[in-house]
Image: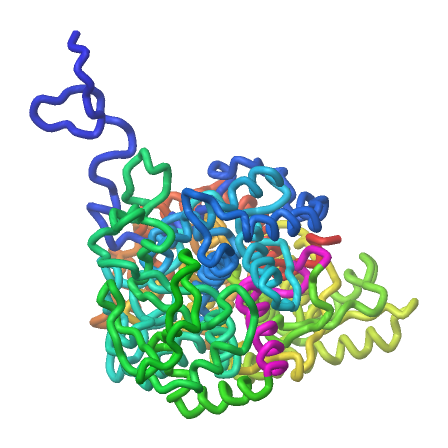
Amino acid sequence: MSTETKCPFNHGAGFSGPVPAGVGTTNRDWWPNALPLEMLHQHSEKSNPMGKDFDYRKEFQSLDYAALKEDLAKLMTDSQEWWPADFGHYGPLFIRMAWHSAGTYRIGDGRGGGGRGQQRFAPLNSWPDNVSLDKARRLLWPIKQKYGKKISWADLMILAGNVALETMGFKTLGFAGGREDVWEPDQDVYWGKESKWLEDKRYSGDRDLENPLAAVQMGLIYVNPEGPNGNPDPIAAARDIRETFRRMAMNDEETVALIAGGHTFGKTHGAGPATHVGPEPEAAPLEQQGLGWKSTYGSGKGGDTITSGLEVTWTTTPTKWSNNFLWNLFGYEWELEKSPAGAHQWRPKHGMGANTVPDAHDPNKRHAPKMLTTDLALRFDPAYEKIARRFLENPDQFADAFAKAWFKLVHRDMGPRARYLGPEVPKEEFIWQDPIPAVNHPLVDAQDIAALKAKLLAAGLTTAELVYTAWSAASTFRGSDKRGGANGARIRLAPQKFWEVNQPAQLGKVLSALEKIQADFNRTASGGKKISLADLIVLGGCAAVEQAAKQAGYTVTVPFSPGRMDAAQEQTDVESFAVLEPVADGFRNYVKGKYSLPAEYLLVDKAQLLTLTAPEMTVLVGGLRVLGANFGGSKHGVFTARPGALTNDFFVNLLDMGTEWKRTDEHGTQFEGRDRKTGTLKWTATRVDLVFGADSRLRAVAEVYGAADGGEKFVKDFATTWAKVMNLDRFDLASR
């Protein structure tokens, strides 16, 4: 037998050996438009080395937090030969790492952000905007290694940014832990349609950015620092900045504070042409052990570092908090120049500012300050300029604004304060945290719950109305940024009470009946017990589900946990909540308009935001259809002669080969099902109904519920999954 080494991945002429599992043409290669059901099962226990019983909240609370911060502070000035610190301080590098971890968040779907430590994985670990952050994480590894499971990478990366600010003289607002790591890349985040780094195929019309994207190019966190598509126009750059930061939940004042505050520290790196830079981490050779962008320019590090291709130091004290960024911005007139790498940047006119800025690695060199095109946008955009000048003249306002904007930036995707952990959680509450009042009264007991259920079922409301209202309230939840849900009863407030999908007229009727029950109970209950409208909305849905199961011949109890409270309108940012309005909700057979993606894709997207699996999505759709919980009372998908009873009829009739389906419109959005023999119309349906018979994977699940012995399992699974959705926002339960 030959001892010649064979490549196990090359099976052309002259090679032999077994074909390893996982290579070759995949189903996705053959059918690229298949439903992305895989994202409903990402981050499973099988990928998690910590095991299903691991409790990160408990581990974090046993952390020696003060010692960890002390170790991080020491790291800031412990420069390593393999990656020397600029100006002898790693603080600016760690600020950038934390910023770029959190800064992928976008309000459109709540995805992105630093909540799961995704910067460790593709594609983020290899984005052009994240060059050199692989080194930042390696610098952190000895600390992560020391504290192990008590601090997640997700928390550590953000905390390192906070400590970096503090060691350079800035007083932060605080820090909240609680970000739990995952162990593989997210599959649910749409980063854009481009196939090459820094491509831009996301605009249409007059520079209208595709939803839900926020960044301007593939592989950038925010905007192009040279200006739109490299055009060094500060006014045009301001337009991009405003739109991008708005889509990341920042207003103009927060935007100016973040840019000016962040660029108070450190520098950019463009010592030479990008042709010297090797492949990104995901494409780098094995021996580089996950590090990428190896440079052949000089030493490839220190003063020879290449990241963005820009060579800019903004201030005279790049490792100290100051107002110097703003002073320089307004104190000089600026002219365009090229960096050593050929990128557009700006220098003071007439040689002003010479020798005022230190060199990052050579104490014998001095430089003039430089600016990016996006920095000059803060001076030349009228709205930004007004804010920036105010910050220049009022340093305390600038520091306060940056502290609040930074805290928001790195905590925006964490959800409500109930999820915050640690000794440095600020006492101050912010409206962007979607505050809900704390429970201030005794809660209802089992006897009260039973009595309230009876009153709800006798209130003159239909099963469909109770179910529809409860679903409308709870299904606003997004697992991505932990926003929405039934807690707070914000369905009775603007903007939710006006949303078309919530059927305002019906909603008003239901809420009026529930408010009467609430008032009667709270007036007469013993021991000071009260019930919130939020709890009643959910309890009404639970009671209706139980009644519907009884009508189908099954007894089931839907789990219910009281303790929700009612938010006030002044605790609700209308503009912020507007992004939670569904453009489609396949569970209610609702689509607001025409979209490029078929409705079944939008259903899967909604299911993923609700943290549902494919079986959970399937059982909910089947149950909601027979309960009549369709938008506008539509009969599409109501495959039953017993509407209102929680039967498995949806699946039985969907899988009936006696029915032949045909399109009723040219776009294939609605269908008729007729008897194969007689041609008699039996049912009507939408794409989100028929997909459960058409997609082979969903059909396999539907067959479980459509089987002769599937009725009882269907009812039990529906009740369990219904309760899951009702409690998705009950972070208070997890912390009890």
Instruction: Tell me which corner region of the image, top left, top right, bottom left or bottom right, holds residue 459.
Output: bottom right
Taking the image as shown, residue 625 lies to the left or right of residue 380, namely: right
Above or below residue 161? Residue 392 is: below
All told, the count of numbered labels is 0
Instruction: Tell me which corner region of the image, top left, top right, bottom left or bottom right, holds residue 683.
Output: bottom left
Residue shown at 59% from the left, 66% from the top:
485
Q: Is residue 408 magenta?
A: yes
Taking the image as shown, residue 70 lies to the left or right of residue 125, namely: right
Give the quarter of the figure containing the N terminus.
Answer: top left
Q: Nearer the viewer, residue 556 or 332?
A: 332
Above or below residue 37? Residue 686 is: below
Above or below residue 47? Residue 84 is: below
Q: Is residue 75 visible?
A: yes
Residue furthest toward the left?
A: 13
Indicate the position of residue 666 as horizontal and vertical percent values: 20, 71
Instruction: Tell me which corner region of the image, top left, top right, bottom left or bottom right, holds residue 523.
Output: bottom right
Which color scheme does this rendered protein use?
A: rainbow
Indicate the position of residue 612 as horizontal and vertical percent values: 49, 53
Residue furthest toward the top?
A: 1
Q: Is residue 352 magenta?
A: no
Q: Which residues are magenta?
A: 395-423
Residue shown at 62% from the left, 47% from the top:
71
Residue shown at 25% from the left, 50% from the top:
297
Residue furthest toward the front?
A: 364
Q: Is residue 621 visible?
A: no
Taking the image as shown, residue 604 lies to the left or right of residue 532, namely: left
Residue shown at 37% from the left, 75% from the top:
354
Q: Nearer the viewer, residue 422 or 30?
A: 422
Indicate the position of residue 696 as horizontal and vertical percent values: 32, 46
The secondary structure that most of the magenta stretch takes on is helix
